[in-house]
């Protein structure tokens, strides 16, 4: 049993216990506890770790800061993910947070709750906060499973996450009968005026529902105009899929080819980085007088149009790549006025 002694107003713990896995004596001492209860709690946790043969794991967690763990995670884990670029940005933000200097073993859900509340107060969206915490949660899981910190708990798992909120339902507006141009026409015109490739990218997004990353990764070798299919060998959900190409989609693709009668044999259809799209698309929206539109909203728009064309859920999902009907529903926003016309 641990010895707990008060010295100069602080509490000290001394542990001497046999490690059953090795038969060796383990001696641990820690000073500076403000209360006896804190000292006793630490002693209990450490003795349990020794009994289970994982006290080295506890030491590793106590000696590894979040900053050090994040740096290792960024080096060894992040590069293996499809969203490596986006995750690297989230890790950079964590490295700049007040929690970065804390030891992994000392980070509790109360610390994360304070961080969560601060982020919400600063205006961060619930979705952004949930994604940031997902990175941290996986880091704790990897540390426990692969970095010799088996005793390390995951404080994110017991944290109350912000509600994801309602799905975005932003669709392009079409002022029928008003004499004004639709948002789609203004958007494509503004994007094309800014850069021909940006206009073609938006047109293909609306015609196929492909994700931004899928559009930018699309290779000429995977475009078959005879079959009217674009093959995506590596998608976000880990499965390959074939995307049917409408006449509008084919026209957008041909606009990117030096010779519309013969597509290039290799290379990417859109040889641009996602950060370039993030810079140029908002500028085009502003020039078109369109507010509150994100590039990813084009996927919502395209998905909704598939249903408006009469496709059933399975057919629509095979085009968009949604793995569950629930997610497909989240991306589908049918206009009541359009449904009214179909009802007669």
Image: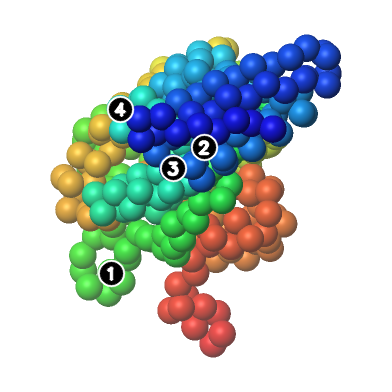
Pick the residue in front: 291 or 53: 53
- Which mark is drawn over residue 42? none
In the rendered image, residue 123, in percent from the top left (x then y), is placed at 26, 52
State the CA–CA distance, disc 3 to disc 2.
7 Å
Residue 185 visible from this viewpoint: no
State the CA–CA distance, disc 2 to disc 4.
31 Å
Residue 175: image quadrant is bottom left
Mark 3 neighbour density, 10 Å: few (under 14) some (14–19) many (20 or more): few
Q: Nearer the viewer, mark 1 or mark 4?
A: 4
- Give the secondary structure at mark 1: loop
Q: Nearer the viewer, mark 3 or mark 4?
A: 3
**Tag 1 and tag 4, C-beta contact below 8 Å:** no
State the CA–CA distance, disc 1 to disc 4.
46 Å
* Residue, disc 4: 96
Residue at x 35% of width, y 48% of height: 114
First of labels 2, 4 by sequence position: 2
**Tag 3 and tag 4, C-beta contact below 8 Å:** no
Quadrant where the image shows the N terminus: top right
* Residue, disc 2: 39
Residue 196: image quadrant is top left
- Which mark is drawn over residue 35? 3
**Tag 3 and tag 2, C-beta contact below 8 Å:** yes
Q: Nearer the viewer, mark 1 or mark 3?
A: 3
* Residue, disc 1: 175
Residue at x 55% of width, y 66% of height: 308
State the CA–CA distance, disc 3 to disc 4.
32 Å
Quadrant where the image shows the C terminus: bottom right
């Amino acid at each position: 049993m641990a010895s707990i002694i008060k010295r100069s107003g602080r509490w000290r713990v001394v542990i001497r216990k046999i490690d059953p896995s090795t038969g060796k004596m383990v001696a641990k001492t820690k000073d500076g506890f403000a209360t006896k209860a804190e000292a006793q709690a630490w002693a209990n946790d450490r003795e349990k770790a020794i009994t289970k043969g994982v006290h080295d794991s506890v030491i590793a967690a106590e000696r590894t800061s979040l900053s050090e763990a994040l740096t290792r995670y960024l080096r060894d884990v992040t590069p293996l993910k499809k969203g490596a670029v986006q995750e690297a940005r989230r890790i950079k933000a964590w490295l700049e947070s007040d929690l970065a200097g804390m030891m992994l073993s000392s980070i509790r859900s109360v610390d994360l709750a304070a961080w969560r509340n601060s982020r919400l107060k600063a205006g961060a969206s619930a979705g952004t906060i949930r994604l940031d915490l997902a990175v941290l949660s996986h880091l704790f899981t990897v540390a426990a499973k692969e970095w010799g910190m088996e005793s390390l708990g995951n404080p994110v798992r017991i944290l109350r996450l912000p509600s994801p909120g309602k799905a975005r339902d932003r669709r392009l507006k079409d002022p029928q009968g008003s004499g004004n141009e639709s948002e789609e026409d203004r958007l494509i015109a503004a994007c094309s005026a800014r850069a021909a490739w940006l206009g073609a990218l938006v047109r293909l997004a609306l015609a196929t529902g492909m994700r931004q990353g899928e559009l930018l990764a699309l290779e000429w070798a995977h475009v078959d105009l005879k079959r009217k299919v674009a093959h995506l060998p590596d998608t976000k959900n880990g499965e390959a899929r074939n995307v049917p190409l409408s006449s509008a989609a084919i026209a957008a693709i041909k606009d990117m080819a030096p010779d519309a009668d013969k597509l290039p044999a290799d290379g990417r259809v859109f040889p641009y980085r996602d950060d370039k799209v993030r810079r140029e698309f908002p500028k085009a929206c502003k020039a078109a007088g369109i507010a509150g539109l994100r590039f990813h909203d084009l996927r919502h728009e395209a998905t909704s149009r598939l249903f408006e064309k009469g496709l059933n859920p399975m057919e629509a999902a095979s085009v968009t790549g949604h793995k569950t009907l629930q997610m497909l529903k989240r991306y589908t926003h049918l206009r009541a006025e359009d449904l009214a016309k179909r009802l007669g």
